Image (tube, grey):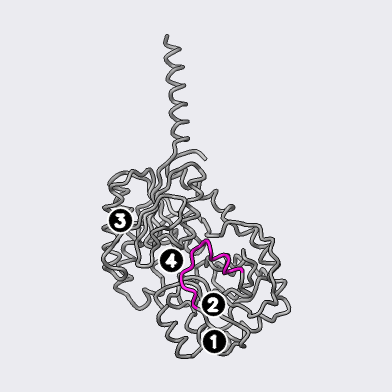
Amino acid sequence: MANLAILFLAVERIYCSYSQRMKKLHIVTSVTNDLSNDQRVRKICSTFMQQGHTVFAVGRRLKSSNDRLKLLFQHHLLNVWWNKGPLFYLSYNIVLFLFLLRQKADVLIANDLDTLLANFFVSKLRNIPLIYDSHEYFTEVPELKNKSFKRKIWLSIESYCLKRIQYAMTVSLPIQDVYKQKYGLKCELVRNFPNYKEDKSQTNVQNFPKIVLYQGALNRDRGLKELVKAVKFLTEDVHVWIAGRGDEYEELLKLSQELALGYRLSFLGHIEMDRLSEVTAKASLGLSIEKLDSLNYRYALPNKVFDYIHAGVPVLYSPFTELDALLNNEYIGQALKSHDPKKLANQIQSMLTHNDHATWVVNCKKLAKEFTWEKEEDKLIKLLNLATQRKA
């Protein structure tokens, strides 16, 4: 009988261990955007759903938010009274905290510093594992430049939380190194590359007019004012498209009208992710011309660069620390030489007629196979398993 009892206990332990490993998790992730164009969050949610987990995403409702947003995962948009500034961040974290307290969650994911505080306290109060996903070097964004008081507040939040959390991931090696040195936090490197789709199209490098595309947020220090001014120095067969919205949208639109650029510069506004790839593929040249004054930009791996590469579109890019190292002299375009509007226009014009433009296109399509989400998501799964003490 004793031997049978021991055997029964052993079988029970194995079964319990197996059940724990096979348990499907309910994951709650939160952001401050409205989820419509958050590529990283969508890919992460998709990866976890493919593992059989349930995913619930929490975002913020904006005036432009689409109530019929087509997502494969459950989601909810929170209403707050303020849309920007300190009162927004305070009110959103209070509303988010109260909302998360009521959720049944096995894991919380806080995307960026502006959602971390609410997630951190709910995690502690309810003893739920928390994963912090740092999409950027938040305390070094241009919007905090020359705003020492606001920056001190964010630095205090960053220091308090990052010294006390165990599980984190980020998008580039320099940010990973900073968090390790400052807070002793080991972040998993999960780079924000696109999903790979085999491109069988034949890009027509002689198309007219030639489209030069900037896609992404229209925010400070992204070289957009200089780009608008550069348009008047381009030949008339070159049209510039700016896709996206942001804090500088109205100012850029006004500048374009003052310069009477007309049809040569088009503001495409917000484009749903499902359509954005179609727009990108029409370009002859993609721009990622952020200024290097900001450590956030200098340490970044801009999503748009890899969207261009996957679309077979040559790139004019700012030589960021990590981007320059990753491309490792890959011949897919050129590094930006100057933000001066006339010099910028000259470089754009030169690249469009460059003898190697067709070679850049071919090299982009080859490189797309190397920089894929499929090669990054294994690290994401391992981090989730570690946070929930599951075996990979």
Q: Earlier in the sequence, mark 1 or mark 2?
A: 1
Are the residues flagged by discs 3 and 1 in contact, CB closer than 8 Å?
no
Task: Please report the residue visible at 52 percent of the width from the left and 67 percent of the height from the top.
Answer: 302
Residue type (three-letter) at the residue carrying disc 3:
Leu
Q: Secondary structure at mark 2?
A: strand
Q: Residues within 10 Å of mark 2 (few under 14, many from 20)?
A: many
Give me the C-alpha separation between circle 1 and circle 4: 29 Å
Please state the total of marks drawn on the protein image: 4
Q: Earlier in the sequence, mark 1 or mark 4?
A: 4
Q: Which residue is mark 2?
A: 241
Residue type (three-letter) at the residue carrying disc 4:
Tyr
Give me the C-alpha separation between circle 1 and circle 2: 13 Å
Q: Which residue is mark 1?
A: 230
Quick check: 325 left or right of 15?
right
Give me the C-alpha separation between circle 3 and circle 2: 36 Å
Give the magenta range: 267-281
Residue type (three-letter) at the residue carrying disc 2:
Trp
Q: Nearer the viewer, mark 3 or mark 2?
A: 2
x and y, in percent, of residue 5 in the image: 42, 14
Quarter of the image containing the N terminus? Answer: top left
Q: Nearer the viewer, mark 3 or mark 4?
A: 3
Residue type (three-letter) at the residue carrying disc 1:
Ala
Say which quarter of the image contains residue 36: bottom left
Q: Earlier in the sequence, mark 2 or mark 4?
A: 4
Q: Earlier in the sequence, mark 3 or mark 1?
A: 3
Q: Which residue is mark 4?
A: 137
x and y, in percent, of residue 135 in the image: 45, 62
Q: Which residue is mark 3?
A: 96
Q: Secondary structure at mark 3?
A: helix
